[in-house]
Image (cartoon, helix red, strand yellow):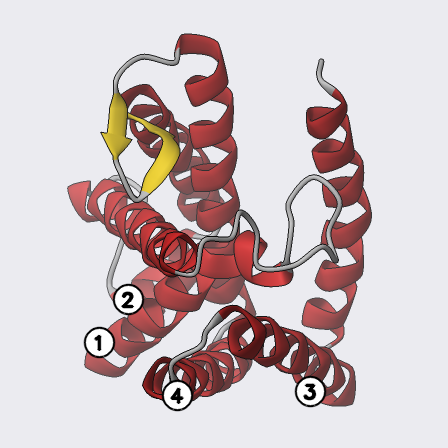
């Protein structure tokens, strides 16, 4: 195992329980967590971009995405945790499959992305999504009209994973545009906070809109 992979695993083991604590506690704790979270994201975004238009619209998106994270968590903690887990599964599946199987590159704006990694993202997301929805069937049926034995549960995990990967590619595009490898150095093995949560920033607003529809 490479030194970079070791750092990535250790930092994940430290970060995830801390974030989970604030998310589950909710109320003031969660508001405090989101405020610090947003402040770091805005700092990284402003530092990495030179064009004022990118800074403005990107900052606006980050604010709206963070607000949707607050609303979705208040609406349903289970649904919110589902989105987080699918995004983590997407990143993890892509990282593992990409490193093990390698193969053809997916797209130029993100040189490390491969087709095998994309496949791994979908596979792990489907597995995690199936077991999670099966465990909390009533929540998903009530909030999104999705049952554990319905094809829509599979479709939802695929869609959330796709949007998560799309978000990853968008941030990768801006990093490449600004000729930087990572958005920051706050997370060893991951880079910046924006590097870590890029997929969530797009997936959470999407699922929030779904809850409004259903």
Query: Hey, which quadrant is residue 140 in on the image?
Result: bottom left
Indicate which label's residue lies in the foreground, 3 or 2.
Answer: 3
Residue 52's mark? 4
Label located before the other in sequence (4 or 2): 4
Foreground pick, 54 / 29? 54
Mark 4 vs mark 3: in front: 4
Residue at 26% of width from left, 43% of height from top? 158
Q: Position of residue 93 (x, y in %)?
A: 46, 29
**Where's residue 171, x and y in %?**
40, 58
Q: Percent from the top left, x then y, of residue 88?
A: 52, 45
Using the numbered discs, state the Cα–Cα distance from disc 3 to disc 2 in whole angstroms: 25 Å
Say whether disc 1 or disc 3 marks the residue closer to the N-terminus.
Answer: 3
The residue singled out by tag 3 in the image is: 31
Q: Which mark is residue 87?
A: none
Mark 4 and mark 2: Cα distance apart in space: 38 Å
Density class for disc 2 (Cα within 10 Å; few <14, some 14-19, many ≥20) is some
Residue placed under numbered mark 1 in the picture: 214
| Structural distance between the alpha carbons of marks 1 and 3 | 26 Å
**Distance of mark 2 from mark 1, alpha carbons?**
6 Å
SS class of the residue under badge 3? helix
4 and 2 marks in contact (CB < 8 Å): no
Above or below 147: residue 20: below
Residue 195 position in % (x across, y down): 54, 54
Mark 1, residues whose alpha carbon is within 10 Å: few (<14), some, or many (≥20)? Answer: few
The answer to whether 16 appears left or right of 165 in the picture is right
Q: Which mark is residue 144?
A: 2
Which secondary structure lies at badge 1? loop
Q: Earlier in the sequence, mark 3 or mark 2?
A: 3
Quarter of the image where one finds residue 143: bottom left
Q: Are marks 2 and 1 in contact (CB under 8 Å)?
A: yes
């Amino acid at each position: 195992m490479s030194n970079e992979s070791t750092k990535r695993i250790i930092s994940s083991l430290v970060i995830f329980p801390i974030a989970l604590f604030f998310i589950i506690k909710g109320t003031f704790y969660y508001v405090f967590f989101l405020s610090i979270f947003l402040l770091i994201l805005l700092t990284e975004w402003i530092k990495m971009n030179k064009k004022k238009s990118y800074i403005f619209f990107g900052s606006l998106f980050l604010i709206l995405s963070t607000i949707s994270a607050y609303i979705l968590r208040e609406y349903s903690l289970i649904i919110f945790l589902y989105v987080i887990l699918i995004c983590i599964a997407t990143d993890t599946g892509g990282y593992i499959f990409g490193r093990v199987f390698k193969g053809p590159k997916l797209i130029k704006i993100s040189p490390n992305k491969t087709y095998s990694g994309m496949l791994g993202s979908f596979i792990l997301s489907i597995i995690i999504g199936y077991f999670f929805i099966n465990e909390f069937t009533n929540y998903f049926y009530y909030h999104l009209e999705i049952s554990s034995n319905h094809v829509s549960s599979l479709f939802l995990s695929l869609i959330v994973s796709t949007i998560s990967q799309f978000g990853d590619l968008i941030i990768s595009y801006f990093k490449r545009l600004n000729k930087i490898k990572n958005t920051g150095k706050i997370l060893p093995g991951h880079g910046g906070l924006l590097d870590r949560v890029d997929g969530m920033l797009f997936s959470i607003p999407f699922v929030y809109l779904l809850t409004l529809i259903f």
